[in-house]
Amino acid sequence: MLRCAPALAASRVNMAGYRLWLLWLAVLALLGSASVRAAAPDALVWRGDHATGRSIMDDLAKEYARQKLGRINLQPFSTLSGLDAVAQGSADFATSARDRYARRAEEAGLEFTPVVLDGAVLITHPQNPVRSLSLKQVHDIYFGRITNWKELGGPDKPINLYSIASPLDGVEYSLRALVYRNGNQPVAAPRLYINTVKLEEAITLDPAGLGLSTLAGTRGNPKVRALAIEGVTPTTQSVADGSYPLFITLYMVTRADSPRRDAVQRFAAFLHTPAAAAILRKHGLVPWADAGDV
């Protein structure tokens, strides 16, 4: 099978160094937990995409509060708005499905720390008979070379390709990096939406629609169907073992000089606790510590 994951190759950080970082976070959490509980610090602010905020971050924030570790105020909107908010100091941290984009000066002072693996999934309407695509077909669809479902074994209908309006959206950027080795590759997607939530809503109304979302974002949604890629169905297991080729990294994004760095790092430490890992797995995500060498 063609393995097209340069972004993942770049994100396969030195695992020994990562484990040292994780150990440091654990020590920080132990040293700070008593004072955190006593001081009841002001809430941290998270800003990011709707798909992450509506489920994953909501559950993590509830568990963080339940353990009396602190509060997280959620501001779901888009990936890019989250990165800019952290850079400007109006948010304490964000999440992103792509690594730092070197050409954006706004991201120069941001730190991108891998947290989990997710799957980039191509979704269609449940009534669409197409069940699987090859990587070459994905390449040609987004390039505008395949424009009709009949070329994929489906009905004689134009492919209505949906995409996210922001060219630096995390999931869209990562897919293009995987398929084209270029996250900025222009694609033939005339139907643009502000985030994956709106895109998914459009797919539910269009049997000829095709768009991109995430495994975690579409998990348990009967109104869309995630297509297999190279015959491999996107699941938590196929993402974890690397057999599903379109696996992506979700990063926690912070500002190196944040005045609330200690509080942010305590939340980062919480993400590596058993309780947080259970929440991540519930949403179909693979905690980074479980990812191994995929």
Image (cartoon, rainbow, N blue to C red):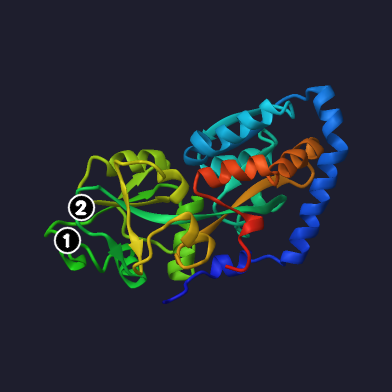
Q: Residue furthest bottom?
A: 1
| Residue 7 occupies quadrant | bottom right
Which quarter shows the N terminus?
A: bottom left
| Residue 134 occupies quadrant | bottom left
Q: Which residue lies under the disc numbered 2? A: 128
Image check: 173 left or right of 96?
A: left
Q: Secondary structure at mark 1?
A: loop
Viewer-proximal residue, 281 or 186?
281
- Kind of residue at badge 2: Asn
Where does the image place residue 207, in percent across and percent down from the top left?
20, 47
How many numbered marks are there? 2
At 78% from the left and 25% from the top, the residue drawn is 41
Q: Is residue 215 above or below residue 135?
A: above
Q: Which residue lies under the disc numbered 1? A: 154
* Mark 2 closeness class: few <14, some 14–19, many ≥20 residues within 10 Å: some
Where does the image place residue 213, in percent across and percent down from the top left?
41, 49
Viewer-proximal residue, 251 or 30?
30
Q: Secondary structure at mark 2?
A: loop
Image check: 96 left or right of 224?
A: right
